[in-house]
Image (cartoon, rainbow, N blue to C red):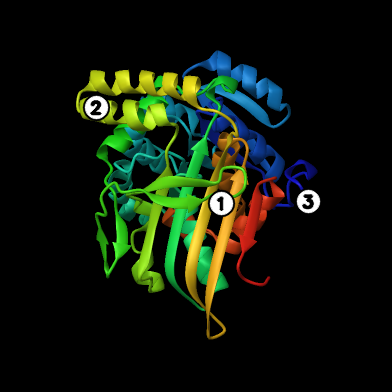
Amino acid sequence: MSWMDGPPHNSRVKRFLVVGGYGGAGRPLCRLLLAQTDSEVVVAGRDIQKAREFAKTLGEGAEALAVDVRDPSSLRQALPGIDMLVLAAAVAQSIGDIARTTLDSGVDFLDILYPASRVPLLRALEPEVVRSGRILITEAGAHPGMASALVRYAGCRMDRVNRAIVAGLMNLDLREHEIGSSDSLSELVESLRDTKPLVFRDGAWRNPGWKSEKIDFGPRFGQKPCVFMEAAELEGLPETMGLSEAGFCVAGFNPFVDYLVMPLGLAIARWKWGVRLTARLLRWGLERFSKPPWGMVWKLEALGEKDGRPAMLEVFVRHPDGYFLTAAPVVACIRQYFDGTIPPGLHMMGWAVEPARFLSDLRDMGVEVEEKGLSP
């Protein structure tokens, strides 16, 4: 079954308020929600004209609404009748207030943002989430989100996992999308500014420095140098699964961005003007110097044991449109939210989903999932 074949049967239509629904990841997210679930979608954001134009293309089951989520009164007015708010707009600095307003309105919450600084703000709300019986899902999407789901999948396929490394490659054609807003790229710059290289080895998370490690992403992209990065979604997994080594690493964008824009940008990103300047340079460098093949790839490399013997598992998750591959994991998670698989509470997406079903649903939506090393 492909995602175009229609949604599975569910007991009740749910309404999703997708803030940033007309953005790069928001567009495929709205389309997939309508195709893959029994839902109605409210395309929301500050630009009502863009919201209306996109909602019109979605047809039945979609509508548009002007919402400024940074304004609690605007958000509260938008939430009656909504089952879940999906946050796909670059508003990480306001996420604590947004989540609190959503919970106070009796609405579930999911975000697909990446700055790690938002995680402590959401964890502070956990007692309220538990008391209210609501569901709050963070670290959803591909980055973050995919790494922890893939590591947990290795735990389903092997009797024991000793080493699990997830690598990500993103080569996006910004010239073909009306995305890459200054807000989104500024948040990316701030996130990279605040991150540090980390890998789990010898019983603790350690800083390996910025030394690169070669990862083979398959025939289209080949080997790429990758550097380890901090990943909040992986915290706790080594202890839970008994891993001796774990981590997330990412390939660069292109030589101009990797060796000129980012070092210069991160040096001046301590100032607000430096963040904005770096975001503009980043977009220009990506548009000017990035080349095909386009796409996003996530790769799991796992070593462990199966049936008493040493075993190796590789899993590739690929799609030519990186924004589609950001949206599809969110909808795969929401499918499990629909049927009650995800209980009330605060969850990271990769910890909340059942991993095998998660990957199966990605296949149904047209994502390429390739597995090597173990028999089916």
Q: Nearer the viewer, mark 1 or mark 2?
A: 2
Q: Which residue is mark 2?
A: 269
The residue depicted at 66 percent of the width and 57 percent of the height is 360
Could you tell me which residue is drawn at 34 percent across and 52 percent down?
232
Residue 333: mark in rendering: 1
Q: Residues within 10 Å of mark 1 (few under 14, many from 20)?
A: many
Q: Secondary structure beneath disc 2?
A: loop
- Give the residue at mark 3: 1
Q: Is residue 128 above or below residue 282?
A: below
Q: Nearer the viewer, mark 2 or mark 3?
A: 2
Q: Secondary structure at mark 1?
A: helix
Classify residue 28 as left or right of residue 2: left
Badge 3: few (under 14), some or many (20 or more) residues near its Cα, within 10 Å? few
Q: Name the amino acid, label 3.
A: Met
- Which numbered disc flags the more N-terminal residue, 1 or 2? 2
Q: At which x and y percent is residue 264?
A: 26, 26
Give the alpha-carbon distance from disc 1 to disc 2, as whole Å: 34 Å
Q: How many marks?
A: 3
The front one of 5 and 367 is 367
Along the line of sight, the residue nearer the viewer: 106 or 195: 195
